[in-house]
Image (tube, rainbow, N blue to C red):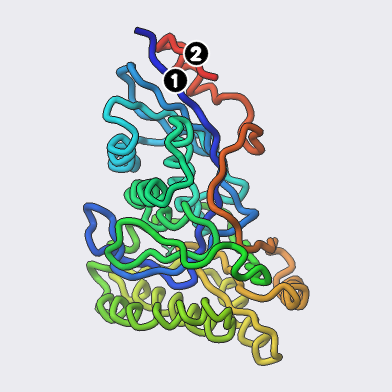
Amino acid sequence: MPPIIHQAISQCSPSLAIMKYWGKAHTANNTPATPSIAVTLKSLMTETRVFVLDGIDAQDMVVLGGVLQTTERYASFFAALRSLCGPSKVFWAESANNFPTAAGLASSSSGFAALVHGACAALGIIKDSKAITEAMSQVARVGSASAARSLYGGFTLLDRQAYHATELHPANHWPELRVIVVRIHDGPKEISSRKAMEQTRITSPFYQAWVDDALQLVPQAQEALANKNLPRLGELARKSYLRMFSTMFAADPPIIYWQAQSLTVMKLCTTLRQLGIEAWETMDAGPQVKIFCLAQQTNAILQALATQLPDCPCLVDEVGDGPCVTTVPRLLASVHPVLANAAKTYGVVLG
Ligand code: DP6
């Protein structure tokens, strides 16, 4: 019997943590040790074309930014995806980002979420159902815990030890909120967040204090978010990222993602706040800085950034929706030669 092929293209935005996940409760199943609260962005986007094949004895394949990836990083994720989509399924995917990959801009969150979403869309198992979204979030978590949050739009919570994320508020909860992404350096990070958080968990003397503290802070952040209280939420977000990094600095060997310009942005935000401009910065596993602010104060912040860091490009984003399926790709052209050649080898026709 000829193989059966289903396909879909999914677009998904990264989940930027306001309160950070850093450290695993269970390494094997990739559940988080700390609860995290995040916002799904709007303009930053991953686009993923997924082919789901049945009746073929082939390897899963992922082409990211035009490069075929090694499958090791994806093995447990694809196993989880097969448990959702069917044990005989094989997945071939190609993915592109409209922002730098693996540079601390949460590309793994949108990447794994788009993969699971695209696969389910191809098979027609996406219904507007809470149970399906939770199941997709659960599979995405195996790939990257932050990806569990990217299956939802608006504001999300991934609780400690949780298997899937939940939506706290839809995107229209806070339409005035803006996120300024300051690109300090586009190169890939020296150490993956997965490796870095394990190194932190195992070697940092401050790790347990970080986890205990996060459990105290996150409910307060949830309340500030519900009330759209930016000064309060910003203060808590700042504690979250600075305490996360403090545990990393104390790891052995230490983990340092910051660059000099990252610190310049942090200090600039402090100065702006003293002037009455609510600019609250955060950072992830990379040197880029993201600033939470309100629409009406965005220009003042951009002007200050342009004066101090004229060489760092800035992008203003807002709160976005969850993933969607498209028939009009914006980032992917025709099927990548790696996948097209594999199709020839197996005698299957893609598309
Ligand atoms: C700093 O979700 O990339 O962005 O689960 O090991 O793949 P793995 O880690 P990942 O880590 C994200 C860390 C963070 C904070 C966050 O997004 O909550």
Q: Residues within 10 Å of mark 2 (few under 14, many from 20)?
A: few
Residue, disc 2: 349
Q: Is residue 282 left or right of residue 264?
A: left
Query: Where is residue 98 shown, x and y percent of the image?
Result: 62, 47
Mark 2 element type? loop
Residue 128 against residue 302 in the figure, above or below: above
Query: Where is residue 340 shown, x and y percent of the image?
Result: 51, 18
* Quadrant location, the C terminus: top right
Query: Where is residue 269 shown, x and y percent of the image?
Result: 63, 81
The three-letter amino acid code for the residue at tag 1 is: Ile
**Closer to the camera, 226 or 231?**
226
The residue sitting at 39% across, 74% down in the picture is 244
Task: Note whether residue 199 is visible.
Answer: no
The three-letter amino acid code for the residue at tag 2 is: Val
Mark 1 element type? strand
Residue, disc 1: 5
The residue sitting at 41% across, 52% down in the picture is 130
Which of the 4 quarters of the picture holds residue 267? bottom right
The residue sitting at 46% across, 53% down in the picture is 109
Ligand 1 under 8 Å from disc 2 Cβ: no
**Which quadrant contains ligand 1?**
bottom left
